[in-house]
Image (tube, grey):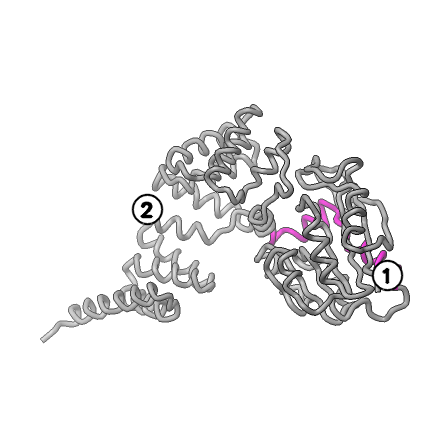
Amino acid sequence: MQQDGEDTALNETELSRQAAEAWRQGDLITANRSFAELARTRPSEPRHWMNLGVGCQAMGVMRDALKAFQRAVLLQPGLPRHIANLGSMFDPVDHGKLHSIMVRRLLIADPLDAEARLAQAARALAQGRKQQATSDARLAALLSPDAAQAQFLLASADKTDTGMVTHLQRSLVLVPGDPFGAHRDLERLIGRRTDQALSSSYVAGLFDFYAESFDAHLTGKLRYTAPEVLERLLQSAFGDMDGWADRAVDLGCGTGLCGTMLRPHCRYLIGVDLAPRMIEKARANGAYDDLVVGDVVEVLAGYSAPFDLVIAADVTTYLGALDPLFASVAAGLGPGGRFGLTVHALEAGDFAIGWAGTYQHSATYVEAMAASVGLSVELTERGAMRYDDGQPLETLYYILRKPF
């Protein structure tokens, strides 16, 4: 006759097998049920809580994931893997202090954890402690030679142009997709021009990082006014019309600041943005009928029904050559459709990375692009859509129109 302890051991073995098999097959629901049952039957076993936390995190049930990871750490406080899992629940921006505490705890448990070293280096750099940032980034690069972020952080902390260029070039060899903006910095340092120095992965990561604090930062500290100016210009363009558009699309919609302005004037409004967390915030805003994560040019080209209005506020600042955008907008607009956009003004030339680290475009270039795809300038105005480092970002506002 089997004893109760033997039954429990058999059940635990079978549940573990079922959980592992379900996880391998991608059946997260079944796997998580088994993880939860294991944690219930053996609450003193930290690995069951860790597995449950990983399962909940994969399913997006973050509150339960946090509780499970906390339980694992309480049961086995010094295990680096448990600390790292718990630390992954704290966003560097939204939970800066908690994230920093978890990084420090992880480095005490495992001083050679490369990811923790990188996180500490990034925080030190953000706080202006370049010596500490360099020390941590160098150690991270030794621990993980293929870590492109370590090279980028070393470039940011380096005091010499030659050193910066070397580290930036190394980061691009490791990760050609450039999620950290190395192409942009190389363009500024040595004039190595590309048509698109700001990669889509860099832009998406940048705005995901700032999603929670974006609205307050943009409208407060940066004094962002593009939606208000575009609304005034569009009101002039549309005149006494009751509605501006049956179908409209807000490219680079962010959290929905322009969507709030457009909503009363548009029957059906779509928002498009590269950053998934921005789209989440825009969904909570409630201004849009549909929201899409993706590259604005590619998404716009995917619609067959024409638009009456396309908006691109503070979008061209992250684009170099504007040919793809203008071609896609012109193809997507119906007869008489309008395109409202902002441009960081450049006095001469076509486009270049400006002092703010984003793209500037000249009026000559923008108007030539418009003409090349059959769009005419209906209204234009010069102003400042926001401030950067306390300086106004000189802006060209345009309302362009497609002929009937």
Q: Which amino acid, by three-letter code, is at mark 1?
A: Gln
Q: Is residue 115 left or right of residue 256?
A: left
Q: Residue at x 70, y 69 (%)?
A: 305
The residue positioned 67% from the left and 70% from the top of the image is 289
Residue 215 is a magenta residue: yes
Q: Residue at x 66, y 66 (%)?
A: 303
| The N terminus - image quarter | bottom left
Residue 390 belongs to magenta span: no
Q: Position of residue 134 (x, y in %)?
A: 48, 30
Image depth: mark 2 or mark 1 in front: 1
* Magenta stretch in the rendered image: 211-238
| Residue 403 placement, left or right of 313 | right
Residue, disc 2? 78
Q: Earlier in the sequence, mark 2 or mark 1?
A: 2
Callout 1 secondary element = helix
The disc label shown at residue 235, or none: 1
Mark linked to residue 192: none
Q: Decide if residue 96 is in sight here.
A: yes
- How far across and down, in percent of the image, does residue 77 sit? 33, 49
Q: Which quarter of the figure has residue 337?
A: bottom right
Quarter of the rendering occupied by the C terminus: bottom right
Number of other residues with Cα within 10 Å of mark 2, as a class: few under 14, some 14 to 19, many 20 or more: some
Give the vertical position of 381 relative to 235 (above or below). above
Question: Residue drawn 58% across and 38% down?
Answer: 183
> In the depicted view, which residue is nearer to us: 377 or 397?
377
Amino acid type indicated by mark 2: Gly
Q: Quadrant of residue 48?
A: bottom left
Q: Indicate whether 340 appears above or below 344.
A: below
Q: Secondary structure at mark 2?
A: loop
Q: Quadrant of residue 212?
A: bottom right
